[in-house]
Image (spheres, rainbow, N blue to C red):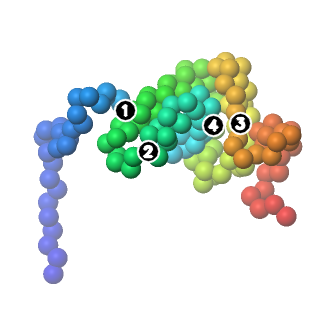
Amino acid sequence: MSTHRGAAFLDQPYVDPNPLPSSVPHVDELGATSAPLKSASFFIGQHCKDVNEDFMLCKAENRDPAHCLKEGRKVTRCAAEVIGKIRESCLAEFDAHWQCLEKNNQYFQACRKPERALNQCVFTKLNLSKTIPGSPEGQPQIHEKKNPIFTRVQK
């Protein structure tokens, strides 16, 4: 037989039992869910490429998670900077695109129209570019195609 346990409400704020050492600089969390991160992912990848590569090289040389905390904080700081710039310059387009991703199970192909508006805004106002890794050379990127196929299954 199960018993009911009453809810426990703590009056004190949460205190991390294992705080980071003082040698690791503090960085606030991004505070974004997967849809806004995916919407800005290509811009974050392009803007933060050097920082991301440093982090991955650090991870390759030592598997200890504490070894790369500083590099990880730099990656978080860079991503927060990019998302902040996009929100300042292109808030309506950014919101439309990530909300479309949220409603369409994170499928990019279902959200090409809001993506095109977001890309145009980011390209003009922030001078960022968008290159999709692994796309065929000599062919236009998917976001540059005028009439992409909007179906989820191609025949």
**Residues at marks 4 and 2, CA–CA distance in whole angstroms:** 26 Å
The amino acid at mark 3 is Thr
The amino acid at mark 1 is Lys
Marking on residue 127: none
Q: Which residue is mark 1?
A: 70
Residue occupying the point 71% across, 24% down: 123
Marking on residue 131: 3
Q: Earlier in the sequence, mark 4 or mark 3?
A: 4
Q: Secondary structure at mark 1?
A: helix
Q: Which of the 4 image quarters holds residue 147? A: top right
Q: Secondary structure at mark 4?
A: helix
Residue occupying the point 76% across, 45% down: 135
Q: Earlier in the sequence, mark 3 or mark 1?
A: 1
Marking on residue 61: 2
Q: Earlier in the sequence, mark 3 or mark 2?
A: 2
Q: Which of the 4 image quarters holds residue 7? A: bottom left
The amino acid at mark 4 is Phe
Residue occupying the point 62% across, 24% down: 90
The reply to whether dot 1 and dot 2 touch (C-beta < 8 Å) is no
Q: Earlier in the sequence, mark 4 or mark 1?
A: 4
- The crowding category of the residue bearing disc 3, from other C-alpha atoms within 10 Å (few below 14, some 14 to 19, many at least 20), is some
Residue most extreme to the bottom = 1
Q: Which residue is mark 4?
A: 42
Horizontal relation, residue 4 to residue 66: left or right: left
Q: Nearer the viewer, mark 3 or mark 2?
A: 2
**Residues at marks 4 and 1, CA–CA distance in whole angstroms:** 23 Å
**Residues at marks 3 and 2, CA–CA distance in whole angstroms:** 28 Å
- The crowding category of the residue bearing disc 4, from other C-alpha atoms within 10 Å (few below 14, some 14 to 19, many at least 20), is some
Q: Position of residue 51 (x, y in %)?
A: 51, 31
Horizontal relation, residue 142 to residue 21: left or right: right
